[in-house]
Image (cartoon, grey):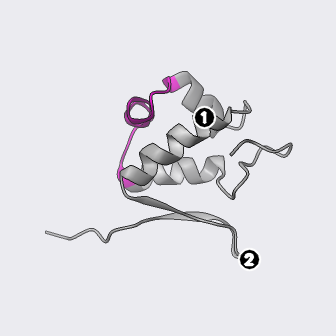
């Protein structure tokens, strides 16, 4: 997966999805950077579409987020999204 020329991530994973995934997990950029092995600065540049990340970088991000329970939803006419793969139990 890489960024295309219009700053979206191929395979229907977009910077907005990365930010939304962090929000679902209640993760800071520092949390995701730690889980993925990236720097906070790199993550910030990716999330703001200021850089074209390498395929290995996108793989590290998606692997970390999916391992934490995020599921990426491809664009299907309603737009791309994210959701938690497992329902949260309310205490």
Q: Quadrant of residue 42?
A: top right
Q: Does the magenta portion include 56?
A: no
- What residue do we see at 45% from left, 28% from top? 37
- Residue 21 in percent (x, y) is at 48, 53
Q: Quadrant of the C terminus?
A: bottom left
Q: Is residue 49 left or right of residue 35?
A: right
Q: Name the residue carrying label 2.
A: 77
Q: Which residues are magenta?
A: 25-40
Residue found at the far bottom of this picture: 77
Of residue 45 and residue 3, the one placed in the foreground of this image is: 3
Of residue 52 and residue 11, the one placed in the foreground of this image is: 11
- Residue 56 in percent (x, y) is at 60, 34
Tell us which disc is closer to us: 2 or 1: 1
Q: Does the magenta portion include 36?
A: yes
Question: Is the residue 79 above or below the residue 17 in the image?
Answer: below
Q: Name the residue carrying label 1.
A: 56
- What residue do we see at 68% from left, 33% from top? 53
């Amino acid at each position: 997966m890489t960024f295309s020329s219009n700053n979206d991530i191929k395979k229907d994973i977009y910077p907005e999805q990365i930010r939304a995934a962090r929000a679902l997990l209640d993760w800071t950029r520092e949390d995701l950077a730690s889980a993925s092995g990236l720097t906070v600065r790199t993550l910030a540049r990716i999330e703001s579409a200021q850089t074209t990340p390498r395929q290995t970088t996108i793989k590290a991000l998606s692997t970390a987020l999916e391992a934490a329970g995020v599921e990426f939803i491809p664009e299907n006419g309603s737009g791309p999204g994210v959701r938690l793969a497992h329902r949260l139990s309310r205490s």
